[in-house]
Amino acid sequence: MSTPQDRPVDPSAQVAVTLDGCAKEDARVVLASLHASFPSDRADDDDPADAAGGAHTVWSATFDVSTTLGLAGPARLSEPVTVTAQGGYRAVDRLREGLAEAFAVRVIGTASGDQEQEAQLRLDNQ
């Protein structure tokens, strides 16, 4: 994870993000916006790539929302994108707030557990 080495990782601040069913370029825009706001387990230059042989592609990364690196500016998508975010309640809310700096965000579904939730977020241009 690209967090400072001297700071322990707080598991309650980790949000797993997955994107599928969208163009590689849109996945790149969404992940770059999140990288601008939060440290991640992926390098900033780790660009999404298509799966070999035309197989269904899913892009994923984990973000540490305990630290805000900055605010992402508005970003452009070629079409609306659905993001699945899984983590603690407050962590998912912080991730959603970070995404709202770059996109129009609408919650289209949630599944709640005892300590965490899974939220489906629909991103569109602001």
Image (spheres, grey):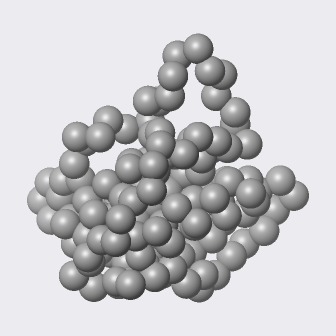
* Residue 10 point in image, percent of width and height: 70, 33
* Residue positioned 64% across, 28% down in the render: 9
Q: Quadrant of the C terminus?
A: bottom left
Up the image or down, 75 lies above or below 47; here it is below
* Residue positioned 87% across, 58% down in the render: 114
Among all residues in the image, which is located at the extreme left?
53
Between 94 and 101, the residue placed more toward the observer is 101
* Residue positioned 63% across, 59% down in the render: 94
* Residue 55 can be seen, yes or no: no
Between 118 and 68, the residue placed more toward the observer is 68
* Residue 119 can be seen, yes or no: yes
Up the image or down, 113 lies above or below 43; here it is below
* Residue 63 as seen in the image, left or right of residue 30: right
* Residue 41 point in image, percent of width and height: 44, 36
The quarter holding residue 91 reads bottom right
Between 2 and 111, the residue placed more toward the observer is 2
Among all residues in the image, which is located at the extreme top?
6
* Residue 125 point in image, percent of width and height: 34, 83
Up the image or down, 8 lies above or below 31; here it is above
Up the image or down, 41 lies above or below 117; here it is above
Among all residues in the image, which is located at the extreme right?
114
Number of numbered tags placed on the structure image: 0
* Residue 40 as seen in the image, left or right of residue 29: right
The quarter holding residue 23 reads bottom left
* Residue positioned 35% across, 65% down in the render: 73
* Residue 117 point in image, percent of width and height: 72, 63
